[in-house]
Amino acid sequence: MTYILAIDQGTTSTRAILFDQSLSVTATAQEEFTQHFPQSGWVEHEASDLWSTTAATCRSVIEKAGIGAQEIVALGITNQRETTLVWDRATGKPVHNAIVWQDRRTSEFCKALKAEGFEEVVTEKTGLLLDPYFSGTKLAWILDNVEGVRARAEAGELVFGTVDSWLVWNLTGGKRHVTDATNAARTMLYDIRKGRWSQTICERLNIPMNMLPEVQDCASDFGETRADLFGRAIPILGIAGDQQAATVGQACFQPGMLKSTYGTGCFALLNTGDTPVRSQNRLLTTIAYQLDGKPTYALEGSIFIAGAVVQWLRDGLKIIREAKETQPLAERADPTQEVVLVPAFTGLGAPYWNAECRGAVFGLTRNSGPEEFARAALESVGYQTRDLLEAMHADWQGASTTALRVDGGMSASDYAMQFLSDIIAAPVDRPKVVETTAMGAAWLAGQKAGFYPNQEEFAATWALERQFHPHMDEGVRKTKYDSWKRAVDATMRF
């Protein structure tokens, strides 16, 4: 047996990736699925789509590689976090569409809970803010709004899970109802210090605790696939939420190490070791990974709009046809103009957490054109990342300034990464292997199977593709960042 199969179940598509013994990608398969928007601010997936695309891509990647299931050592899963499902314990039939992490339908409920002072309880136990983003209030909504569901849940007929739980349930033929510590930590129901579901929070949200899955380490025995799915029962030995899997894939195992993933949004995680650091700057305290029963904690900051700002240039302003056109445009921008774009199209994430403000552009002149917009768009990602890093440094003195490890689609832009290095005044490291999320899931499963090396040896294999060094004059850096802070302040006041 010479391969690990990694499932990367994302928000818009599902991928299956085969890794060989040297952790190189052998083959990939991908399928997109439909997004459902039943009302403004509501986002749903059909639960069957999440499962069918997973099964199909796994079969496809095995076929592409020209191997048999008997050559696969183990399977690892990484997934979109916070997305919420409820299904029948006996039949496996969902009672409602999956409510996606982006969904905002529980905003008013969250406001009411904050007004009664419940956010302090949530933050103390879970490390999270009281926000519709997380699974807890989504689950409460399903219980309270889908006919007959609460009575069935209280009778023990229904179970809850995030996407990883739903996939394992289906992969094992309903034999296992489990999750890992990183996904549990994103539900707003899990006490990350005590390592168990919070009875206090479940009682306040009126959630029957018999619905909740068993929580295990990230590298653990989660069961094995039905033999008829792929031709052989394959052990499921690794699970981590997507941003935590990327942290593992980037080998950020030492306290102080930082990684930032640039996709539609941006997620930065800072390893704080065995210390759960309480943020004073509205960052999230979460579990980076849990191995051998021991959690490693992290501070996390999320930016809503990163790569999506380039999509806006393409689809909204129509000044580019492909993302790769952004860089040459930005390089031709007038250096005497200081155009600042605050891409608060869906509000601002950490450390502001202002859902009401909207995007704004400052510093326009009659000569401002596509070039200046392209530069401002790419620079906005660097500014927002610096906001996160400043908050992390303020929260924890152990935060490293040695280097920031980056991954995700936008990390391929040399211009964006160079500006990022300039504005944070620190090196930015881009790895040779960009499939860091799937690699993290693969390593967890392979390490549990004894197929891949331990943390230290795995970290030693991390390979740099390019390091970006800061070249910007300190005075210029200060002036530019001050302009950004003024622009954000004005945007939130509007």
Image (cartoon, rainbow, N blue to C red):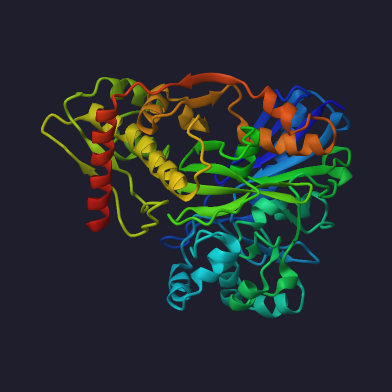
For this view, does 473 lie left or right of residue 242?
left
Which residue sits at x=61%, y=38%? 247
From this viewpoint, which residue is outermost toward the left? Answer: 366
Residue at image position (47%, 66%) is 105
Of the pair 154 and 480, the residue shown nearer to us: 480
Q: Quadrant of the N terminus?
A: top right
Is residue 303 in sight in this rendering?
no
* Residue 88 placement (x, y as % from top left): 74, 67
From the top left corner, tell me how far across and down residue 474 is, in percent: 29, 28
Q: Horizontal and vertical percent for residue 428? A: 47, 27
Horizontal side of residue 320 vs 81, given as left or right: left
Give 321 or 283, whichever is nearer the viewer: 283
Q: Quick check: 389 above or below 207?
A: above
Q: Residue at x 47, y 47 (%)?
A: 302
Q: Considering the image in quadrants, where does the C terminus appear?
A: bottom left
Q: Quadrant of residue 10?
A: top right
* Residue at screen point 41% across, 28% down: 421
Q: Position of residue 450 (x, y in %)?
A: 85, 33
Of all residues, the one furthest to the front in this rendering is 397
Q: Classify residue 176 by image quadrant.
A: bottom right
Between residue 72 and residue 274, name the one nearer to us.
Answer: 274
Q: How many marks?
A: 0
Residue 192 drawn above or below residue 198: above
46 relative to 238 in the view: left or right = left
Q: Confirm whether residue 428 shows in the render.
A: yes
